[in-house]
Image (tube, rainbow, N blue to C red):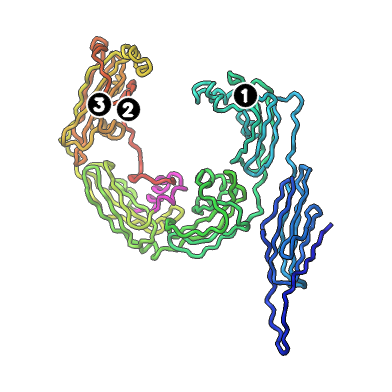
Amino acid sequence: MKKNLFLPTLLLAAVVMEGCRKEEQAPPTLSVTPSEAVVFEASGGVVVIAVETNQESWKAVSDQAWCRIDVVDGTSFSVTADANESTEARPSAKVTVTAGHGANAPTAVLEVSQKGAAEEKPEPEGKPFGITLSDITSSAVVMKVVPRDAEGMYYFDVISKATLDEHHGGDIGRMMAGMMQEAEKMYGSIGEALANLASTGEQEHTFTRLVSDTEYVAFAAGLGADGAVNTEIASEPFRTAALSDAVTFDVEFTNLYFDGADFTVTPSDDDFTYYCAIRPAFQYGDLSDEELLEQLVAEDGFMIDFYATAGVYEYTNEHVWLTDTGYLVLVFGWADGAPSSGIYRFPFRTLEPDSPPAACTFTVNVTDVTSRSATVGILPSDPTAVYMWDLIAEADYRQYEEDMTRYVTEYVAHYTADIGQLDYNRERGESGNIYSKQLEPGTTYYVWAACIDEYGKPAADVLVSEPFATLPNTESAARVDAVIGKYFDGDDLYGLDPEKYADGRGMAYVQVTFSANEEAAVWYGTLVKEDPSDPTDAISDAEIAETLVAAGTWCPTGKLYWCAWDSEYTVLGVAVGRDDNNGPVLRLRTVFTKEGASPVSEFTEPAVATAQYVYRVPFVRYDASVKAYRAPRTKK
C-alpha cells in the first residue's frame, strides 16, 4: 500500500503588464534536508524533512505502509514510524519526493529503516546467568549479563569459536582454569586477580575489534574466592556481520611526481569512517583481500584509530615514495577498532628518473680512514635516481669482479632479509655512512653502487670506485687494568638481606674495578670462568680482543659478580686507542676460596646500584658471520 501526499505551493503574486514578453523559465530544482538515510529505533518516532524547490508543487510517496508521510507545512513533511514490537527489523522503505510534473521533473529518494526490538531472553529456569546480545555488527557486540546472584563474583567475555576449539578443546571451564592460573601470576595473588577481573551485579559491555563474519561465544561463569569456577557456565553463540559493501570509494590522482602523488579519496557516504594507506605494489599486490586487510591492521595497529576519517580526503605528496615504483592506495572502512568494509585498491606509479639508470654515475668520497673505520659519502649524478651501495673487500671483489650484477643481486636478497623491506633500503639523493670499527686493518676496500629497481634487481651496470685501504694494525698505547678487590661469602650476605642476595647462596661475591689510561678511546672487559677443555690461554690475543669488542662490557668501571668457589676465573680486558688499534689484552687469573673471603663485617654496600652478574659460563669464542657492512633499515 502506498501513501501519497500532494501539496500545492503558494503561488507568487504576479503583475502582468500589457505588451511584456514571456520570460524564460529557470531549470527545475529540488533538495531535501536531511538527505541521509533515516533510521528509527524500535520505539519509533517522527522526523521532519524540509523541501526546497522552485516548482509550484511537489509530492512525497512512501512504498511501505509502516512508513507514514504527513504534511507539516508547504515546505516540509514528516516521516512517522510506530513502535516495532517484532525483533525483526522493518523492511526498508523508500520515500520518493518529486517536484513539478512531466518527464523532466526532479526527484529525491530518502532511505528509511526501523530496527527490531531487542530480544529479551528470560533467564532459563535454574540458570545462574541471563545473557542478552544486541547491536551485532561486523566488529562489535553489546553483551548484557544478569546474574541470578546479585552479590556473587563472576567473569564474562567473548571468545572466537575457532580459538576456543583449537586451544581449549571447546571447553570454557578448561579455558577459565588456565586463565585464572595466569592471572594469579600476573597480579601476584588470586585476590588481586579477582579484584581486576571479576564483576558483580548486572553488567553491560560493548566488545569491539571483533573479526567480521566470524563465530563467537559470549559466556559468563561464577567465581569463588579461590578463583575457581563455582557455577554452571552460561554461553550464547553469535556470528558477527559480514563486511559491508554498501559504501564504495573513488580515488582521483591529480598529480604524479618522481617521489609520490597527490590524490583525493571520495566515499559514496560522507558519514562513513575509513582508513587510507599507501604500500608498495610489489610487496602487497599479490595478497588476497583478506590477507591484505589482516596485514595492514597488524602493521598500522592503533594508529588506524587516530588517522581514520570521514568525508572527502585530500592527500598531498609527502615526498617519501621512490622513483619509478608501483604503489597501491588502499582504502577500507573502519569502526569499533576493526575493518567495517572490504578493501579497495587504487594503483599508481611514480614518474621515471630524470635520466635513465645507465646514465647515472656516482661520486665517492672516503675520509677519516683508520685501521678499522672509515667515513664514506656518495653522491649520484641524478638526484631522482634510486640506488643501493656499500663496501666490498678486495678478496670478495676479485671473486665477483666479472659479475658484480650477481653479487649485488645476492647482496640485496641477504641485506633486506625479507624482500618486503626493500622499499625501506633503496635510497635517493646524497648518502653516507660511518663504518665505525667494522673494517679490518690493512685491508683494501671498494665502494660499489647500483640503481636498483622495485624488484631488487640492478637496473644498470654496477659501478665500483677506486680502492682505499685501512691503516695497518699496530699495537696501541691504550691500556686497561683491573683490580680484584675484596670478595665475600654469599651465604653471609644472604643473612644480611635474603631478598637482595638470594642468588648468591653458595657463591662468592666479587668486586672488580676496571680503569684505562688516557690513550684509550674506549675499553672492554669481562670476567669468565675457565673451561679446562678450552682455556683462555689457548685463545689468541686477537680473538680475545675481537670477542670483547663484539660482546664484552663497554667501558666498565666497578662491576659486581657472583662466582663459584674454588674455580679458576680470568678477568679479560682490552682498550682501543683513538686510531682504532687495540692495546695489549689484559689477562688476570685467580681462584676464589672461602679462606680468602673477607669477613662480612667489612662489607659495604656499593654507592651506586650495580647489576650483579652470575658468572658460571666459560669464555665464548666470537663466531664471525657474513654480513653487510651497513645495517639494514626496517619499517617502523
| Residue 247, image x, y percentages | 64, 55
Where is residue 531? Give x, y as percent. Answer: 30, 21
Q: Say which label, 2 or 3, has the lower sequence index.
A: 3
Horizontal side, residue 30 vs residue 463: left or right: right
Task: Determine which residue is flagged by label 2.
Answer: 620
Q: CA distance from mark 2 to mark 3?
A: 22 Å
The label on residue 153 is 1
Q: Foreground: 343 or 240? A: 240
Residue range (magenta) = 402-426
Identity, as a three-letter code, of the amino acid under mark 3? Gly
Name the residue furthest bottom.
Answer: 19
Query: Which quadrant, please, contains the C terminus?
Result: top left
In the picture, the disc for residue 558 is: 3
Circle nearer the viewer, 1 or 3: 1
Q: Is residue 429 above or below residue 40?
A: below
Q: Amino acid at mark 1?
A: Met
Identify the element where label 1 is drawn: loop
Q: Earlier in the sequence, mark 2 or mark 1?
A: 1
